[in-house]
Amino acid sequence: DSGVTQTPKHLITATGQRVTLRCSPRSGDLSVYWYQQSLDQGLQFLIHYYNGEERAKGNILERFSAQQFPDLHSELNLSSLELGDSALYFCASSVGHRGPYGYTFGSGTRLTVV
Amino acid sequence: GDSVTQMEGPVTLSEEAFLTINCTYTATGYPSLFWYVQYPGEGLQLLLKATKADDKGSNKGFEATYRKETTSFHLEKGSVQVSDSAVYFCALSDAGSGTSYGKLTFGQGTILTVHP
């Protein structure tokens, strides 16, 4: 157990739907990062939050949004889902926001859009 | 922008063979370099890292040296075991870019299978 908890582990949904993925960071970590892992794109950085504030955006679609709550857990919202959104979504947490030295990954949420 | 290129896989070896997985990078600043490993059904785990030129990262018999002159960070292990079968990712974090210091840019991953 890495200490980073992601729920649900698996999610199957239909095109056009909306889903929410949840990430609880390791105790004491203030940063949460979201990544998408797909067969064709590999691992892509989506977004980074530090202590409730957005710090950086990567290749995140406008249909996707995220937030980090006061208790530091984060949610990634995916809407108007398309077949191509099927992927593994990972979050990682770290204590600070300068350098990924303390990165810890969760085990991921596998999203299947049918 | 930043990029990482790994040797194409999959790589199949017999137990006790020597392993090399090539990794080269492109970055505008002074990146830190990492190797992560992903076992089936699990998230990524940090295997080793190097934060400046000529640093050697090592862990569990794996090692990699940060070569700035060749922009490379090749992963090596002298004698692989069946339990090393996994996907290996090379990654960089460019702390000098002025953007998110925590962001990692990954290579495409190399699948390693070790047979007894």
Image (cartoon, rainbow, N blue to C red):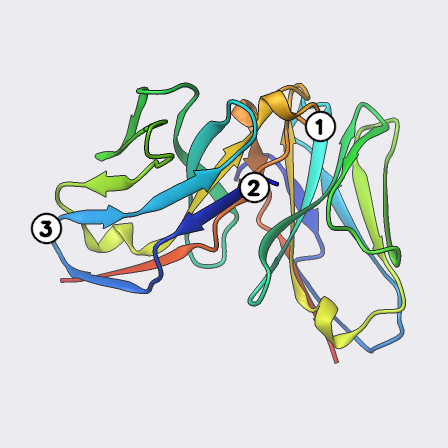
Q: Disc count in the image?
A: 3
SS label for mark 1: loop
- What is the CA distance from the residue labelled 3 to the residue labelled 1? 42 Å
Other-residue count near label 3 (Cα within 10 Å), few / some / many at <14 / 14–19 / ≥20: some
List x then y, in percent, for residue A69: 87, 32
Where is residue A114, by image quadrant? bottom right
Q: Disc 3 vs disc 2: which is toward the camera?
A: 2
Mark 2 secondary-structure assignment: strand
Mark 2 belongs to which subunit? B
Is there CB contact under 8 Å for labels 3 and 1?
Answer: no
Question: Dot 3 corresponds to which residue?
Answer: B16
Chain at tag 1:
B
Q: Residue furthest left?
A: B16
Asked if marks 3 and 1 fall on the same chain, the answer is: yes
User: Label 2, on which residue?
Assistant: B105
Label 1, label 2: how far apart the Cα atoms are? 12 Å
Mark yes or no: residue A38 visible: yes
